[in-house]
Image: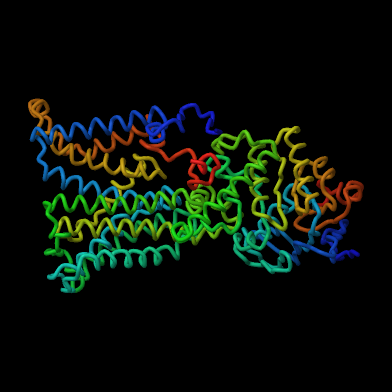
Amino acid sequence: MSDDTGTGTRTRGRGFVDSLVRSRGERNVLGGVAVVAVGILVLTALGVVRLPFLLSLLSLAGMYVLLTLGLNVQWGYAGLINFSVAAFWGIGAYSAALLSAPNSPLGLGLNPIVGFVAAIVVSAILAVFIGIPTLRLREDYLAIASLGLAEVVRRIILNEEQWTAGSSGISGIPRLLEGLPLTQNATNLAVVVVLIGLVYAFLRRVHRSPWGRVLRTIRSDEDLAKALGKDTYAYKMQAFVLGSIIMAIAGAFYVHVNLYIDPSDLIPLTTFYIWVAVILGGTGSNRGAVLGAATVIAIREGTRFLNDVQAFASLGLNLAPLRLLFVGLLIILVVRLRPEGLLPPRDELIWPGARREEGEE
Amino acid sequence: MTEHAGQTGSHEDMTYEGANLGKSDPVLRTEDLRKTFGGLVATDGVSVEVERGSITGMIGPNGAGKSTLFNLISGFYDLDGGRVWVNDTEVTEKEPHETAQSGLIRTFQTPRRLEGMTVREAMLVGAKGQTGESILPLWLSPSKVTREERANVERAERLLERFEIAHLIDQPSTDLSGGQLKLVELARAFTADPDVMLLDEPVAGVNPTLANDIKRFIRELNEEGQTFLIIEHDMPFIMDLADPVIVLDQGKVLMEGTPDEVRSDQRVIDAYLGGAGP
């Protein structure tokens, strides 16, 4: 075995648990996740947290996981700075809502599947459209353009009322898979878990492939990738489109859970949360994106109930308005203690079976 | 076999002889390359040829336009004039990656660190035409991707062994010293199977022992048929390694010749002493 890297903290190749957990810091993080998960389950069992609420919260977290996985493809893999996460999410949401809601301005009432497909197609077209002028330039141009795009998309949806119903929003969006013998909350959660599973499996393979390696080279040094004959523009475009499609899928899912959407949902705050989730989880890490998104939602939603805790209430503290502050503090804490994120990417990402040792397994 | 291009310099007391052209089998050819930055003429009608199988050196005082010339040839700068061929394929105005795919691979003066990659991964970026670099084959023909990847890993391991840095293969590539990075860069460039390799100061900032190793490896690769065009400030290094040597001064080709001819040429001495300016 040539696994000894001299980095000191690695304990790879010893067993199943060790293959999941590669350092003590990571063990602590995963241990923390387990404690929180058990805590939530206990609270649910005791009836403090009601099950339907927990299920819908998990669906929401799942949607954030999808968004974070999407941004991680763009920023984490390829180093593309996209500030229009909310716009691509909104494009997906509106594509699905307009096509599937019977009382939308289009009035088609199509199957949600069509809405999902439309979300993918429309977001891909928009990503190409914004990528063509910006991806050949330095990375900051995409950042600026995407900042503008987010506002343009929101304004168009707000003002083109004949197509989008404008500020009155779209309601009457159908639920997903109503025939299943589950509560709707459970069905929604199952759908998002399947979506995450598919996206994650897809990303896992491309991330470890030579394709992912070219993207990581571009992120680190685009000139080097060019000098080695890689068409960096094409790769950046692929990463940008792929990430945007995943964001749009998250949007399409959202409208079938929330059953209503209006332009005020496309606020830049969503983009901000997703960026926090990517950085918190570990830039470039798929596992990190999942955990980062879950953490952001846990803090955002968990802090809603701080006022219900007697101890705080008796102190006369109103903690609910301080939720953004908690998110900020958390970022500072992570940057101080684990600058690479909660679950940073593996030291080495290589196509499975490419190395002799692994090939024999 | 060779004839001089017969350029005449604009400086009164300096004859810019130009490079030797009309070589029998040039792998890289430039014709009258021009580049200006604002009012500064960085490259002024450079025509050079690199013979297949040679180690061609390129020297010149600071600001002579050597790195600019590399950037023009490899497509990183846009040309103001002139043409470039690699293996009789014209790569003028081509994107850097297209020039690379035509068989010209360059390295950079400052070694590039690939963050978040081990040396093994950093080596694997080099190979050309990898099936797994497109998304669809990852699902349609994963076994082909595995085969290629395995072959590339083995090749990378062999090369690192040969360059005596096999022990670094699991290291994060950001942990290497400057000299080790230069070696990795050389090895990686070689995995792209280039017809001609452009090395921009391969031993700048490298300790003498490692510099000697690098010299030995370049010579070995050359004996196996690899063509090099090398910019280097380290005179003993380049004079020992390269033949012919092209001398650049003020964006023009001053002369080309054997190391001995270059060493004893009064114009070269003047250029290095700063005597060329008007």
* Image vertical order of residue A130 relative to residue A35, above or below: below
In front of the other: A236 or B123: B123
Residue A10, can we see it? yes
On the image, the x and y values in percent for residue A305 come to 13, 36
On the image, the x and y values in percent for residue A190 come to 21, 51
Residue in the image at 46% along x and 33% along y = A13
Q: Give the left or right position of residue B76, taking residue B236 as reference.
A: left
On the image, the x and y values in percent for residue A332 come to 33, 34
Residue B116, can we see it? no
Q: Quadrant of the N terminus of chain B?
A: bottom right
Locate residue A338: give its quadrant.
Answer: top left
Locate residue B204: give its quadrant.
Answer: top right
Residue in the image at 71% along x and 68% along y = B83
* Image vertical order of residue A62 relative to residue A249, above or below: above
* Image vertical order of residue B65 relative to residue A31, above or below: below
Locate residue B278: give its quadrant.
Answer: bottom right
Q: Give the left or right position of residue A176, taking residue B76 as reference.
A: left
Residue in the image at 79% along x and 61% along y = B49
**Which residue is farthest front?**
A360
In front of the other: A155 or A115: A115
On the image, the x and y values in percent for residue A5 come to 53, 31
